Image (tube, rainbow, N blue to C red):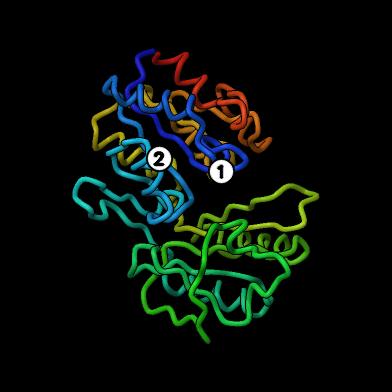
Amino acid sequence: MNYRLVALDIDGTILTTEEELTPRTRRAIMRVRERGVPVVLATGRRLIRTLPWAQALGLTQPLIVHNGAVIYDQASGKILNQEEIDLKVAHSIQQELETRFLNYVIYTGESAGEEVLAPSGTWQEPENLLLRYLGENAEFVDKVHLQVAPVRISIVDRPQKVDPFYEVLTENYGDQVNAMLFGAERDKWRGIEIIPHNCSKGTGLAYLAESLKIPQASVVAIGDNVNDLEMILWAGLGVAMENGSPELKAQAKQIAPSNDRDGVAEVLEELFL
């Protein structure tokens, strides 16, 4: 198969467990790009935390950030596409979160998700959950007043609080948002990513492929977690990392070695080099 577009997740995929980019993986990505095959990053990160990796790899294609809610064009510095959670729905979810005393942050719509807000008094855990699980430093305010529909809401808290709330989300808001539950059964902490309905890395990748006039069958996508599922299923070749979630691996067409064993490099070398 003549693959013409590659989409790569960042955390747990091109980066090792220690959040490093190995020389072999860097070299493989850059050699694919040099052969004229566009390589795009598709991540749950926001733009400011994605750009350094794109620049380090010399990638110039648009970036899929916030799990597909925002697509940013590096060439023009403009937002190509932005999806938002309905404002009334966001207000309702926010009220549920506060009633249940759950740790949450909101990525605001007016900033294309670059402004991260959290209510004061939350995230007061012994561990820095914001930094460890989201890689963020939020701006704490007395009250998060949403005037514009947000692009994303993120939650990290104890499983006994998160799991019941996830059930509420799927039952009451299942047709209004895309809610993704992160974490294994025995994990100390659990997370939920909430983005707009009918929005995912898969829809973001489809948008870019269409703009580049590249057919679905000619697209390779590689990821490791539940937020990569739609992307893996949409691509002509969907690859899951060995260190990935069981759900993702069960539905992928191919399993790559783990992120600590240069799994991305091995797949790219086999396909392109």
Split into 4 quadrants, where in the image is the N terminus?
A: top left
**Outermost residue to the bottom:** 142
Q: Nearer the viewer, residue 116 or 192?
A: 116
The answer to which quarter of the image holds residue 202 is top left
Circle 2 is placed at which residue position? 41
142 up-or-down from 9: above or below: below
Q: Is residue 155 left or right of residue 36?
A: right
Residue 261, x across and y down, in percent: 61, 26
Residue at 42% x, 23% y: name it: 28
Residue at 61% x, 24% y: name it: 257
188 up-or-down from 41: above or below: below
What amino acid is labelled 1 in the image? Glu
**Neighbours of disc 1 within 10 Å: few (<14), some (14-19), many (20+):** some
**Outermost residue to the front:** 23
Residue at 48% x, 71% y: name it: 90
Foreground mark, 2 or 1? 1
Circle 1 is placed at which residue position? 19
The answer to which quarter of the image holds residue 95 is bottom right
Label disc, if present, on residue 176 of the rendered structure: none
- Look at the image and tell me whether residue 114 can be seen: yes
Q: Is residue 81 left or right of residue 172?
A: left
What amino acid is labelled 2 in the image? Leu
Residue at 47% x, 13% y: name it: 270
Label 2 sits on a secondary structure element that is strand
**Neighbours of disc 2 within 10 Å: few (<14), some (14-19), many (20+):** many
Residue 45, x across and y down, in percent: 47, 52
